[in-house]
Amino acid sequence: MSLKTLKVYEKRAGCSKVKFGWNPQSVQWYLESEQNTSFYRKTVEELHPFIHDCKTLLDIGCGIGSFAVEFAKKGYSVTAIDKSSLAVESLMEKARLMNLSNLKVINKSFEEFIFDNNYDIVFISYMMGLVNDNNIIDFLKIANKRLVIVLPFSKIKNDFSINELYTELGVDLKNLEQFNYASMLNILNKRNYKYIIKKVSAEFGQPFDNIDEAVNFIYHYFKLPVERSDDVREWLNRKTTYKNGKLFLPNLRESMMIII
Ligand SMILES: C[S@@+](CC[C@H](N)C(=O)[O-])C[C@H]1O[C@@H](n2cnc3c(N)ncnc32)[C@H](O)[C@@H]1O
């Protein structure tokens, strides 16, 4: 390890606060959502005009790799890293089945990853705890041409119209506060970085086999009182529709792409 790499590594250690855990069920939910919605494809389509002069891309916190696959399909030479072995295994299997030889998948956290070379694009999506004032300098160091950060548009999370359920149950919407693109722009403005922003709205709903699965899903992703599960079920009965023969909870996801 060179001294320069070692210094970046030491500085990075312990500065991630991303709270996101995978289990076999959540991997399955993401896979089904990815196959039945437009979020990943549409985001990459809309980003493409800003990055078509780039060849190599590093996807940090790739998860099950829905973005990494879309970028690889477009011909970029992609390296995808994630600290979750479960998510990475799912992506490796997908890359193998799709014969994507331009996609390299690595099971490492950003803090552990040793950067042998730079990438034309460093891409980071929905990693709210990782894109902070300190890390932004490291991301820029390894990005030859662009750093692309995708973040939620709203300060109060409203995936799956969840605000409505919180309000019906009398749960404080403050619990849904999140780091959004505006917080990121504050960091960039403070440092006088130049950037372009582009809003993307795309369907990112969730298919289910039945209403019990939908209830489990809501309790997996949102902290709601267990004793209100009948009200949650009743709300889901009102909100879900049918799509491709499955129960479907719609979700118009609004994101902001920040291109630096
Ligand atoms: C909300 S998911 C986003 C996945 C993907 N980027 C997307 O937009 O669909 C956050 C991901 O970051 C990963 N993660 C969290 N902290 C990380 C770190 N320090 N280094 C690498 N991956 C990390 C998690 O395992 C998870 O897969």
Image: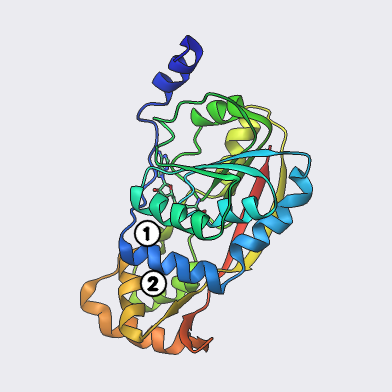
- Mark 2: amino acid: Tyr
Judged from the image, the secondary structure of the residue bearing numbered disc 1 is: helix
Label 2 near label 1: C-beta < 8 Å? yes
Q: Residue 32 carries which label?
A: none
Quadrant placement of the C terminus:
top right
Query: Can you tell me whether the CB of the residue at mark 1 lies under 8 Å from the nearest atom of ligand 1?
Result: no
Residue 94 x %, y %: 49, 58
Image position of 218 (left or right of 157):
left
Q: Residue at x 40, y 89 (%)?
A: 237
- Mark 1: amino acid: Asn
Depicted 255 relative to depicted 192: above or below: below
Image position of 100 (left or right of 25):
right
Q: Can residue 172 be seen in this view?
A: no
Residue 38 x %, y %: 62, 68
Q: How crowded is mark 2: few (under 14 residues within 10 Å), some or many (20 or more)?
A: some
Q: In which quarter of the image is residue 77?
A: top right
Q: Residue 166 carries which label?
A: 2
- Of 34 and 170, nearer the camera is 34
Quadrant placement of the N terminus:
top left
Judged from the image, the secondary structure of the residue bearing numbered disc 2 is: helix
Q: Residue at x 65, y 50 (%)?
A: 257
- The residue under label 1 is 175
- Of 56 and 209, nearer the camera is 56
Depicted 13 relative to depicted 202: above or below: above
